[in-house]
DNA sequence: CCACAACCTGACCATCCGGTCAATAAAAAA
DNA sequence: TTTTTTATTGACCGGATGGTCAGGTTGTGG
């Protein structure tokens, strides 16, 4: 657990959004703590300290630890779904998948904590988001598979299994968030620079797009 | 947490290997529980129940929960290192990387728990295996990068960044263990069949090997 | 058979953690 | 200003958990 500084407080704003602001403060702290310690390892006290609020205050805004956790998991899921926009309306696989890789890599860089929380949740058997997997994610996946299949049918890319391609995209992009610590350690202990992130995106796109015969 | 049956007991064997056998029993149970609940969520009582031993007996063989955990993490690491054999002495990238993908996919299928424990450990900042990352893993990685670079220099594959290729191999193969639950849910709730595993291996090899210009 | 070592385990303890609550303060409404 | 709603927080509680230990059992070497 990193003993880093607590989540920075933003400007007070009008007194009416006390609720929204404190919820934001708590959610940000919770995302970080859940990512670094897991659900079982995280404590409300730790989250409270990082948010700069007394523990009892957390329970005023979020009834239980699980409620708070559920909210954190939902957030990253929404963000990922939005990245789907890159996929649709693309004229060809190189454009669509290329943009999707860019979008997901950007998310891995800007929301590494959320990605880790999601990964842990799934690894534990998705106890609180099983319904998401069965409904929203399933529909989303089916839709994207149809898009890819259309590209294949039109001869715009090689006839690879669309599902396994999707999994490869998820695995590769999220790896840079979930295994960020390992990557950093193998990078002389330094976080990837702007330039290195650009190189990663280029490398991944090159290999995958050539791999599916889309270039 | 799956309330599945406890780890099956093997034959008694000679009285002298009581120690080895019980350690095996405990380690197998621990691997599963740590994978499904995380370090913080796992309890010694749960591990004991799954191993079919009283809790106090666990502490007879493993002083602390952390000792037990450390042993579990080390195991999967050793197994992965062994898969490196596929890499070396290969005449060309298609053979070497193809065999490595096969080996790592097989491990994802046979040791999904260990893979999850490793993933969680790294996501939490590698509190107990940081030294592995900095020494063994770093050296292993450097060695493999050299092998790949040699292939590139000999014109046997496209000039892709060897490091990012390695990360893609790790990400993709381990995804099928770490996100096995998600994959199963998207597969109508059914675990992948023998045939589906074969298809995955084929798909992954096809895309990556073509992606690096090795076929 | 004896003595010693290895193994086993129920009962116990100190600590920690999620959650509650009552009392108070601060805003907003009246 | 008075009333009502919303936000704040220290103190507390019940339950769970990692770990201990003393006394017992089993197996083995002499």
Image (cartoon, coloured by chain):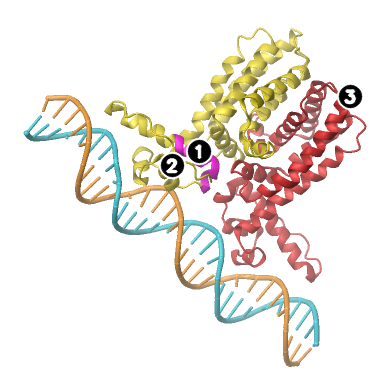
Chain colours: A red, B yellow, C cyan, D orange
Using residue A95 as the reference point, say whether residue B212 is left or right of it. left
Q: Which mark is residue B32?
A: 1
Measuring from the top left, give residue A27's x and y in whole percent: 69, 56
Q: Answer whether residue B18 is visible to the viewer in this image.
A: yes
Determine contact: label 2, label 1, CB under 8 Å. Answer: yes
Dot 1: what SS?
Answer: helix
**Residue picked out by circle 3:** A156
Measuring from the top left, give residue B188's x and y in whole percent: 68, 38
Q: Is residue B7 magenta?
A: no
Q: Callout 1 environment at 10 Å: few (<14), some (14 to 19), or many (20+)?
A: many
Q: Callout 2 environment at 10 Å: few (<14), some (14 to 19), or many (20+)?
A: many
**Quarter of the view holding residue A122:** top right
Q: Is residue B116 above or below residue A61?
A: above
Using residue D23 as the reference point, say whether residue A169 is left or right of it. right
Measuring from the top left, give residue A192's x and y in whole percent: 73, 34
Farthest-out residue, right = A91
């Amino acid at each position: 657990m990193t003993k880093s500084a607590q989540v920075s407080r933003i400007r007070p704003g009008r007194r009416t959004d006390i609720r929204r602001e404190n919820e934001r403060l708590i959610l940000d702290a919770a995302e970080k703590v859940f990512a670094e310690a897991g659900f079982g390892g995280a404590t409300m006290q730790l989250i409270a300290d990082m948010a700069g609020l007394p523990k009892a205050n957390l329970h005023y805004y979020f009834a239980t630890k699980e409620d708070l956790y559920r909210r954190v998991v939902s957030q990253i899921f929404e963000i990922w779904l939005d990245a789907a926009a890159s996929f649709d309306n693309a004229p060809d696989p190189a454009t669509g998948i290329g943009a999707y890789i860019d979008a997901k890599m950007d998310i891995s860089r800007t929301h590494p904590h959320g990605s880790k929380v999601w990964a842990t949740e799934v690894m534990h058997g998705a106890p609180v988001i099983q319904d998401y997997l069965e409904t929203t994610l399933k529909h989303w996946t089916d839709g994207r598979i149809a898009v890819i299949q259309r590209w294949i049918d039109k001869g715009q890319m090689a006839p690879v299994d669309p599902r396994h391609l999707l999994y490869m995209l998820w695995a590769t992009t999220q790896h840079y968030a979930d295994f960020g610590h390992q990557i950093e350690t193998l990078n002389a202990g330094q976080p990837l620079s702007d330039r290195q992130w650009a190189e990663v995106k280029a490398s991944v796109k090159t290999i995958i797009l050539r791999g599916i015969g889309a270039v």
